[in-house]
Image (tube, rainbow, N blue to C red):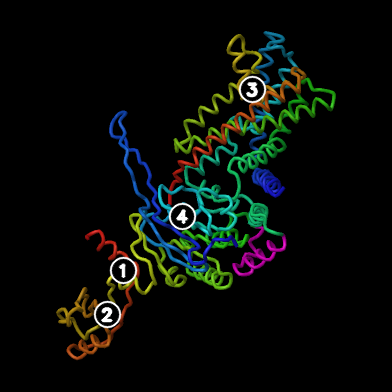
Amino acid sequence: MDSGVDDEGFIRLDGVEKVFDVRKRTGFLRRERREVRAVDGLSFTVARGEMVGYIGPNGAGKSTTVKMLTGILTPSGGTLRVAGIDPARERTRLARRIGVVFGQRTTLWWDLPLIDSYRLAHRMYRIPDARYRENLDRCVALLDLGALLDVPVRQLSLGQRMRGDIAAALLHDPEVLYLDEPTIGLDVVSKARVRGFLRDLNAERGTTVLLTTHDLTDIEQLCSRVMVIDHGRLMYDGPLAGLHEAGESERTLVVDLERELPPIDAPAPARVVRVEGPRQWLAFPASASAADLVARVAAAYPLVDLSVREPDIEAVIGRMYAERAGA
Amino acid sequence: MGAGRLYAAVVAGGFRRYATYRAATAAGVFTNTVFGLILVYTYLALWAERPSLGGYDQAQAVTYVWVGQALLSTLAIGGGGAETELMERIRTGDIAIDLYRPADLQLWWLAADLGRALFQAVGRGVVPFAFGCVFFPVSLPGDVGTWLAFLVALGLAMVVGFGIRFLVALSAFWLLDGVGVTHLALLVGMFCSGMILPLNVFPGALGEVVRLLPWSALLQAPADVLLGEADPAGVFVFQAGWAVVLLAAGRLVQAAATRRVVVQGG
């Protein structure tokens, strides 16, 4: 496309900062000004065609980052490029090449049939007629929108509306897609459908996807790479598997004994974390072998049943935050 | 060319969005008719007491009332135009979506509001106006040219009306709660547009001033064109002048607002 755009650094942030001035009333006319660093020296690159999860707690700076990437917020410092474009300076030009989907907001025309919003997108993005029809047909087929096109958006269910919104963001073949909580509030079936569609989109069209979510299953199923942000800083950037190590995650061995017994005397570093009647929970490092632990417990105690639970990422991230906060 | 088609689509969408709500339109027609009746009887009493008040005879005064009722919702003088929605979007942060679009915020909303105004003119304006013309003595022009001039003045009034209300809406970027501003805009709009009494009734400096303010481009100006009380060319210049000034001001405020924008919510 543009000359000077390298595919490795398709999205490139270099020491990006965003400082908000917050005024607080402290007296009748007195106001205190306070600086809030929503994003603090953020640097990362995303290659063309990558699908990256961007996670962090509320107020971590995720939305602020996305707003800067789309050009509706100007960074206070640092440089930022998307497809070689400085978003804040050329918001409209960039808008033609990106798609944005919000789980909690809609870009669709609320009072009008779904198809009207697509016709508008056709004009807005100046999509060639043939291309528009092809993309619309494809989205309608894959997202199962056929029966919904003539239904006013306000009458759609949340899952239907979400699918409608995703289609609206893709009619102009965006090179980058920002997804902000695309599965929030959806039922299991709708979630699976949205994820399946996004996976195919990324695989077939090579669309670069930045996914912000609280639902870690989204990340597990879609993203090979995950970035964790907190207090405006990047805390982790790498494969999902590595996140477990970074958070020193633990697996859990759940054992059912024949009868109630005092806590199992487990070999360190494994330890009993919970006892409930004959059932006991033992935590052990995710990197350690479960077989060894099982063998030693089975040898010394009357076992009825057992299961091993994999660590959940939510807990891992929680632990990571707690650690940094303590440090 | 491409941009023209986009904004034409937005106008059409604005029209159809309002056309969706038939019950609301019917209720609006009823309200405008009743409001018109109250005003007409008040005016009839007033003009019986003071014939040719403000230079209007009784039939002109009655016509003025029904033009006013036809334009009240069309020009959203009492609120309820694009600014209501825009303020809500600024408050909730949905404005972010408008800013993500490869379109100009002001032109987009102007187009949406024109679509709304065109629908309101047809859907809510025509019936009360026709009702008034049938049941009361009115003074209507006999020549097509005056009617056409009225429509031009009406079109310009729509733009001026949007220009004022866009500025009102953008205040939400700073105030976040637009209730106070909306009430103030309603009060000023009703009085200064001549919705309560024609502006040429007001004596002295007050009259001189309100007739120069942008609100007089909304109702007073098109009404005077229809009643043959003003030179259309002069009216057009007056309206177009305010339209340019207000849209330019809106553009400046929009630039300032989006520069310091703190889009609400995550």
Identify the amino acid type marked 2: Val
Q: Which residues are magenta?
A: A129-150
Q: Residue at x 41, y 57 (%)?
A: A14
Residue linked to disc 1: A316
For this view, does A167 lie left or right of residue A88? right
Q: Earlier in the sequence, mark 4 or mark 1?
A: 4
Identify the amino acid type marked 1: Val
**Chain where mark 4 sits:** A
Q: Do tag 2 and tag 4 residues touch (Cβ < 8 Å)?
A: no
Q: Is residue A139 magenta?
A: yes
Disc 2 crowd, CA 10 A, few/some/many (<14, 14-19, 20+): some
**Chain where mark 2 sits:** A
Q: From this viewpoint, which residue is outermost toward the bottom? A: A299
Q: Residue at x 55, y 66 (%)?
A: A207
Q: Nearer the viewer, mark 3 or mark 2?
A: 3
Q: Position of residue A28 (x, y in %)?
A: 30, 29
Give the distance between the C-alpha atoms of the residues marked 3 and 2, in whole angstroms. 79 Å
SS at badge 3: helix
Position above or below: B190 against A177: above
Q: Position of residue A107 (x, y in %)?
A: 56, 53
User: Residue A254, labelled with which disc?
Assistant: 2
Give the distance between the C-alpha atoms of the residues marked 3 and 4, in whole angstroms. 48 Å
SS at badge 1: helix
For this view, does A145 lie left or right of residue A212? right
Q: Do tag 3 and tag 2 residues touch (Cβ < 8 Å)?
A: no
SS at badge 2: strand
Q: Main secondary structure of the magenta part?
A: helix
Q: Nearer the viewer, mark 4 or mark 1?
A: 4
